[in-house]
Structure formats: C-alpha cells, structure tokens
Image (cartoon, rainbow, N blue to C red):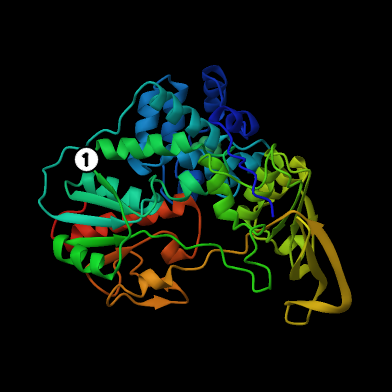
Amino acid sequence: MLKADNSLPETEIAARFPDLHPALDARAAVVEANRCLNCFDAPCMSACPTHIDVPRFIKKIASGNVTGSARTILDANVLGASCARVCPVDVLCEGSCVMHGKHEQPIEIGRLQRFAMETFYDAGGKLALRRREERKQRVACIGAGPASLACAAELRQLGFQVKVIDRRALPGGLNTYGVAEYKLRVGDSLREVRMIQDLGVEFEVGEVDPEGLTELERDFDAVFLGVGLGAMRRLAHDGSASESVVDALEFIAGYKTGQRTSIGPHAKARRVVVIGAGNTAIDAACAAKRLGAGEVTILYRRQREHMSAFDFEYEHALREGVVFCWATLPKAFAAKGDAIELQCIATAQDETGQAVPVEGSEFTIECDVVIPAIGQSPLLELLSQVRGVAMEHGRVVIQRTTGQTTNPKYFAGGDCVNGGREVVDAVADGKRAAHGIAAALGGASS
Ligand code: SF4
C-alpha cells in the first residue's frame, strides 16, 4: 500500500495553496469601502451571527482609520480575522447586502474585513483589554476550537481566570487543523490564538477523562464544553480500514501540519476518490488536486441539488478540476495491487426522496486513495461521561440564551451543540455562553 513520506516543507505548501481570494490592497479597500451606503438598520449586520457592526467598520476603512475598523470587528468577534477568510459571506452578510436590490455587486464585506484585520495584526495590533476588575472565579474551557476561544476571550474581558484544555498539540481546533490551507493558514489561526493568550488565558494540552472531569468540577467554578465533533464517520464496508482509506479531516490536518500524506508530488497516489459532498469533501478534493493528484472524483449518493456544500464551493471544485459523480453509492473495496477497486452502484430517488440502489447498475472505479468525508460523529464517549448533561440526537442540550446545559455547572456551544455549523456560529455560541457563565457566577455579564 502507498506509504510515501510525502511531508511538504512550509514553502511548498504556501506555493501549492495560494490564497483563494487575494487580499485587497489599501487603495482598493478604500474604493470598495466608499461604495457602501452605510445603511441604517443594516441587513448585513443582522445576517452576521456575531452582529459585527459592518457599516461602522467599513466607514472607518473609508476614513483611513484601519485600526479603529479592526477594533470594531474584534469588539463583536474575537476571531474576526479567520471569519473574514472562512465565512460563507455569500449566504451571510454579503448575501443580504442591499446592493443586490439595486442590481449592483454586493459590497465585498469579507475582503474588507480581512483587509482591516490583517493590516491590524501585521502592524502588531493587540486585543484591547476592556476596563474591568480581576475576579477570583475560574472557568475551564474544554476544547481549543472557535467556540472555546470566543468563550475564553470574553470571560477574560469580564475578569475571570480561564484555562483552555485541548488534546491536540496546537490550539485553534478546525481553524488550525480542518480548514483548507488556501482559506486559512495554520500560522494565521495561531496568530489569533496568541492574541487571546496575551489577554491572560492559560492553555494546556491534555486529554480530559472521567477523573479529569471530576478534578475540573472541583477546581473550577464553571466548565465550558467546546469539544466540537469527533472523527469522520467510518464507511461500513469491508476494506474501509485499509491504509489507503484516509479520513478527510486527518488528511487535511496531515498536509497542513507537515505530516506525511499518501497524496502528493512525490507519492504514487494519482487517483483519488472522495466520498461525500459537503464542504469538507470539497476542501479535501481540492487539496488532493493541489498536492498533485491527477484525477480527483467526488462520489455522492444523491444529486447536485441535494449536496450540502455551498454553491461557491462546488464552483471552486469544478475550477480545480474535480469531477463529480452523482447518484453513486460505494458498496465495497477490494485491494488490487497497490490500487483499490471501489465497487459502486447507481442510485435513484424513491417516493420518500431517499436515494436507493438501482439493481443491476453495479460498476467499479479504480483508484489509489479513498477519502471518506461523510460527516463527523459526535464525541459521545467523552460527553456521556459528563454527569447530568443531557444529549439529544448526539447533541448537547443547552438553554439557547445562556448556553447552560442541564448540569448548571456546565455550559456548551459550537459543533457539539449545533451538529457542525460555521466558525462564526461557534464564536457567537462561545460569546453567549461566556455571558451566561458570568451571570450564573453572580457577576454582571457586560
Ligand atoms: Fe453597506 Fe451593503 Fe451593509 Fe448596506 S447592506 S451597510 S451597503 S454592506
């Protein structure tokens, strides 16, 4: 089986994954900012889950106050830089811009936000500490992804002592490990985390087991669960444990952090099949292309209109040369020398809308690597160990306005609650929970 040591140096990763949308320069940013109508009751602001004051930050760019613009963004969203790169702006802020009604291009809010944030960070900008008194109460955040980071930063701003614990060596969660490099680089994710660290948030690497949970309950006044989701769901077929079958998130994390992958310029793997049609499937397929795979095919059991990936992600994949094979269900794998023979069957939609196999339509696809991207499973093992925290359909149950779980000591937010949404949703959850925690611990929440 294919086991080439294919780790790529950072410079080669950078060359193979150039920015999807190059940054605006200062002049272009001012021109674009001046197109904004600075709407009263701006719909772009309501469409943002963190309610960034979009007209305000854009106006500051237009007037040359880029630092003020970045601070306006950070006031609402501490991960404003990564959100500027990974948010599906077409369906959020830019999708609701009034310019659509005037048959004009929407304002490029995402690129303006990115311009403000990157100019700010490149100039050594730091998160401003709000005026507050230190509080003795301690809060632990389990997981170092966007929800926990937002919760931790907001709690520090409210004066609490905060520790973030994560099992992985680098903080940032999916921002660091799971988003395609051409959208968000590892270094950019870590730069944002450093800003939060500079506020006085403590970070620790470690697994939290039942004993650890008991210790956290004893040593901390509240615990925030921002654990996200677990590994990609495994395929049920024989052969899915083969070394040539690579979980999409592991594959993305591998090439982003310089670990060996079985796809790349020096590897033999030329033909890649990705199973699933969500945004992670697209990220994995495009990455395989960028790493040098000759043929990359996405198999999906249903039709294009049913895929969960955003339209712009689909268009991007087509431009990268990814081929889509609709209404196709993989049934089994068989090793064929160094290659894999993937046995598939065509599907049709039944009267209930389900994709069902069409008898007699079997066919095979030969490939070198299979990347399942069929959704992440909940971290049931960990979450079931948290006493008194109710789960429903694999998700932690919370009070929407406070993030509090059915165990009053625990709060939660992000993917473990919503089942897997955008980074900006996780940030909104984390921030909301921070205020819920502050209120529960007997302090004003703002
Ligand atoms: Fe500017 Fe469009 Fe927002 Fe109006 S809706 S404030 S034009 S970005």
> What residue is shown at x 29% (from left), y 67% (from top)?
404
Foreground of the two, 265 or 443:
265
The reply to whether residue 365 is in sight is yes
Q: Count residues near mark 1 (Cα–Cα under 10 Å), then give few for <14, some for 14-19, many for 20+.
A: some
Q: Which residue is mark 1?
A: 200
Element type at marker 1?
loop
Q: Amino acid at mark 1?
A: Gly
Across and down, in percent, residue 46 comes to 46, 49
> What residue is shown at x 45% (from left), y 34% (from top)?
187
* Above or below 326: residue 59: above
* 336 displayed left or right of 89: right
Across and down, in percent, residue 151 comes to 31, 52
Label 1 beta carbon less than 8 Å to ligand 1: no
* Above or below 213: residue 391: below
* 94 displayed left or right of 58: right
Residue extending furthest toward the right: 360
Foreground of the two, 203 or 443:
203
- Quarter of image, res 324: bottom right
* 233 displayed left or right of 349: left
